[in-house]
Image (tube, rainbow, N blue to C red):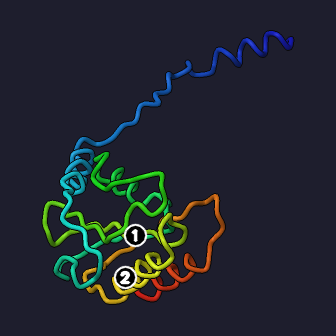
Amino acid sequence: MRRSEKSKDTKAKLAPKQKISYEKKTDPAVTAYAVQSLTWLRQAEFLMSAPKLDLCVEDTGYEIAFAGRSNAGKSSAINALTNQKQLARASKRPGRTQMINFFSLGNPDQRLVDLPGYGYAAVPEAMKIVWQKELENYLIHRKSLQGLVLLMDIRHPLQHFDLMMLEWAHSRHL
């Protein structure tokens, strides 16, 4: 048998090419569940701002706080998560968030919290010290704090305060 005849035989025995579909196939029940499970995030509403811990929302229910250096994207992350462009006020100017901001998630006992950033901010040094103290008070004393999202800018190496936040979150099992 010649070489050309052999290759013709081989080609004849192969199955016809099947069209491969790259469409994402999801179970409609799973899709409905995913939409329903995200609904509570879409119901987020501004609740209040507090300059210090003793003026915060009552310490009941549960909270997930967003922390990080100034301009790390905390407010933007909350806006993206809730699919609301202006729920949390975001700015390119470091130090825009100056108070502890609370957002209810359809129920006042379920909250997201936007914390002031630490590190560089275009404010006087005395103001930064006050913010740092209130941030520390919130993180240590808040019983309803059940989770912490720590945002970091990958363009900058971890700083001392970043490491302190990671250690603190680990020690509180957040």
Of residue 97 and residue 164, the one placed in the foreground of this image is: 97
**Is 34 above or below relative to 10?**
below
Residue ID at (43%, 76%) = 127
Query: Which of the pair 83/126 is nearer the observer?
Result: 126
Whether tag 2 and tag 1 are in contact, CB under 8 A, the answer is: yes
Q: How far across and down, in percent of the image, does residue 59 sit?
A: 20, 82
In this rendering, the answer to whether 121 lies above or below 134 is: above
Q: Quadrant of the C terminus?
A: bottom left
Give how far across and how far down residue 56 sits, in percent.
22, 78
- Outermost residue to the left: 107
Q: Quadrant of the N terminus?
A: top right
Q: Which residue is mark 1?
A: 116
Helix, strand or loop for disc 2? helix
Residue at label 2?
A: 134
Dot 2 crowding, Cα within 10 Å, few <14, some 14–19, many 20+? many
The amino acid type, in three-letter code, at marker 1 is Pro
Q: Which mark is residue 77?
A: none
Q: Nearer the viewer, residue 112 or 102?
A: 102
At label 1, counting other C-alpha atoms closer than 10 Å, the crowd grade (few under 14, some 14-19, many 20 or more) is many
Q: Is residue 174 visible?
A: no
Gap between marks 2 and 1 measured at Cα: 9 Å
Q: Residue at x 61, y 80 (%)?
A: 160
Residue drawn at point x = 57 percent, y = 22 percent: 15
Which element type, helix, strand or loop, lies under badge 1?
A: loop
Near-viewer residue (87 or 31) = 87
Q: Position of residue 62 (x, y in %)?
A: 23, 76
Q: Amino acid at mark 2?
A: Glu
Residue 91 in the figure: left or right of residue 161:
left
